[in-house]
Image (spheres, rainbow, N blue to C red):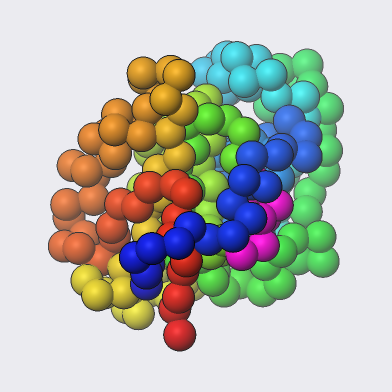
């Protein structure tokens, strides 16, 4: 859990994007910008609009994408089609937006090496510059590039982390999953207060198993 007091060392390093490639929110797909299933929930027209507004210059997909799997379920498709759907979506979006298709990340190229999600946080980034993998002392987490994408992405992350492929039942009121708000105080619509207010009603249904924290985080201890 979060201890009171000192901020986790090295947190400043987290504001360093390696590139502007759009990835999934998955904790295994670090760097760049993040939307669930690389934007599959928006549909093509809206995804293209957001990709352009964000200055995204490439799109990837990745192995065993929980967000795409859920999308397939919601759209009456078989779970076995998710791998193909993820790849086809990334290719289609790249082509429609006129940016590079940067390929499919398999477990060998991801931080996550199997189907288990080890995220204990979801970073809700109002700055559009946040890369937790660049600051190794930060807790592992999904990243939602809220600056350019959508609160719905965060709900998907919570569903995955709290589900059977994440720590699931291990998140409790005393050891919650953290929704970590990273505000940009120069932009009122992305301030920490505004983002936290946006999240609060969405977290009520979890009865305290998801708690809002603000960045920079205190030292994190989950022993
Ligand atoms: Zn994914």
Residue 167 visible at all: yes
Q: Position of residue 43 (x, y in %)?
A: 52, 26
Residue, x 52% and y 25% (percent of image)? Answer: 148
Q: Quadrant of residue 106?
A: bottom right
**Residue 174 drawn in magenta:** no
| For residue 110, side relative to residue 200 (left or right) | right
Residue, x 22% and y 71% (percent of image)? Answer: 173
102 over 7 or under it: above or below: above
Q: Position of residue 164 (x, y in %)?
A: 42, 74
Residue, x 83% and y 27% (percent of image)? Answer: 100
| For residue 52, side relative to residue 145 (left or right) | right
Numbered range of the magenta stretch: 131-137
Q: For the view shown, which residue lies furthest in the bottom direction?
A: 223
Residue, x 37% and y 69% (percent of image)? Answer: 3
61 over 112 or under it: above or below: above
| For residue 85, side relative to residue 147 (left or right) | right
4 over 102 or under it: above or below: below
- From the viewer's side, name the closer residue of 21 and 40: 21
Q: Quadrant of residue 205?
A: bottom left
Which quadrant is the N terminus positioned in? bottom left
- From the viewer's side, name the closer residue of 200 and 86: 200
- From the viewer's side, name the closer residue of 89 and 34: 34
Residue 156 visible at all: no
205 over 61 or under it: above or below: below
Figure label count = 0
């Amino acid at each position: 859990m979060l201890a009171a007091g000192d901020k986790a060392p090295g947190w400043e390093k987290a504001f360093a994007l390696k590139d502007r490639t759009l990835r999934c929110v998955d904790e295994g797909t670090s760097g760049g910008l993040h939307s669930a299933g690389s934007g599959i929930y928006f549909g093509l027209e809206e995804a293209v609009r957001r990709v352009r507004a964000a200055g995204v210059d490439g799109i990837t997909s990745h192995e065993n994408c929980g967000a795409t799997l859920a999308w397939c379920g919601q759209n009456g498709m078989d779970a076995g089609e998710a791998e193909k759907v993820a790849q086809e979506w990334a290719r289609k979006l790249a082509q429609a937006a006129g940016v590079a298709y940067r390929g499919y990340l398999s477990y060998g190229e991801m931080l996550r090496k199997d189907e288990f999600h080890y995220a204990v946080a979801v970073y809700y980034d109002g700055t559009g510059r946040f890369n937790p993998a660049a600051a190794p002392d930060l807790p592992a987490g999904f990243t939602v590039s809220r600056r350019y994408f959508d609160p719905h992405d965060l709900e998907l992350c919570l569903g995955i982390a709290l589900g059977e492929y994440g720590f699931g039942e291990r998140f409790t009121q005393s050891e919650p999953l953290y929704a970590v708000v990273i505000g940009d105080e120069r932009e009122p619509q992305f301030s920490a207060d505004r983002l936290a207010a946006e999240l609060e009603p969405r977290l009520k249904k979890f009865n305290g198993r998801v708690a809002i924290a603000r960045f920079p985080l205190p030292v994190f201890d989950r022993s």
